[in-house]
Image (cartoon, rainbow, N blue to C red):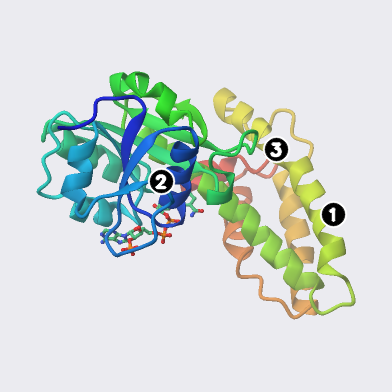
Amino acid sequence: MPVHSNKALTVLGLGDMGSALTRSWLAAGYAVTVWNRSPRRAPAGAAVAATAATAVAANTLVVVCLLDDAAVRATLDGIDLTGRDIVNLTTSTPAEARALSEWITARGGRFLDGGIMAVPSMIGVADSGAYVFYSGATELHEANAEALAVPAGVNYVGADPGFAALYDIALLSAMWGMFAGAAHAFALIGKEDISPMAFAPLMVAYQQAMAGYAYGTAAQLARGDYAEGVESNLAMMVTTNGTLLRTAAEQGVSAELLTPFMALMERRVAEGGGKESTTGVVDLLRR
Ligand code: NDP
């Protein structure tokens, strides 16, 4: 018989993230049944199930944290999900999450998707800033609010099961832009007698100072006017791009991380957006 308790749950997947999640629930006094495809050492105190089906049968609340959507499908295929609350913390696309929701609901389960905005070492650590976007079945979310709040903060973004993934991937995509810029900057200073350790705090401070730029972009998108209140106009920035490219050439660094964005900036200027900020690039990306 499954355990209907808000102090017991199943975790499928004992990778870096699944293990961290399991440890956080164990530390909070939850009884955790775990399953992993291949033998891995389970966190001390967890009950190891021999099969995914046994693990799912053990508890009403089942948290899934596997590599990707295909792994989730392969694992849950053929298992009785009647009456189960499936919380999928595997990174997936919005469409994958919506399709998974339909697949699970059709088999008698309830579905909540989640996007984890943290690395494993932040899980279960108070004030680490870790949180999870959730979307999907509101009733599932409300019924399990206490358990879901254990590993990280909770940010429920609506009943559409695709929204958690969309918020998650949008923020991850923004992060790649930041990482790409950092990689280029470190390459630029790399051949000189400049310590990366001394340079890093300058980069962090500057990126933090510039991060508020997103508020201006958001306000312009909301107004539909991209030229009002602009203090760094696109025509000027495109000219400055030439200096960035010449510097890369002087330092023997490939500009391949910068040029796609620069090309979009140039296109917007060519189309008459020279007095705007970079907000018009958002429109160029929409297909
Ligand atoms: P790991 O690579 O550490 O673990 C992957 C897990 O998926 C293992 O349990 C593995 O099992 C399992 N797996 C892979 N393929 C299959 C399959 N076909 N069938 C069944 N199980 C399978 O990854 P993480 O734990 O780090 O990540 C898990 C999820 O969490 C990912 O979706 C990731 O994007 C997300 N996430 C991870 C973060 C991180 O920093 N680590 C941050 C935020 C989200 P086996 O041991 O048998 O290989």
Would you call the spot at circle 2 few (<14 residues within 10 Å), some (14-19), or many (20 or more)? some
**Residue with the mark numbered 2:** 45
Residue 213: give its label: 3
Q: Secondary structure at mark 2?
A: loop
Q: Is residue 97 above or below residue 244?
A: above
Quadrant of residue 202 within the rendered picture = bottom right
Q: CA distance from mark 2 to mark 1?
A: 45 Å
Is residue 80 found left or right of 187 in the rendered image? left
Is residue 264 found left or right of 93 in the rendered image? right
- The residue mark sitting in front, 3 or 1, is 1
Residue 168 seen anywhere in this rendered image of the structure: no
In the foreground, 248 or 266: 248
Which image quadrant shows ligand 1? bottom left
Instruction: Specify which label sits upstream in the sequence, 3 or 1.
Output: 1
Q: CA distance from mark 3 to mark 1?
A: 18 Å
**Residue with the mark numbered 1:** 202
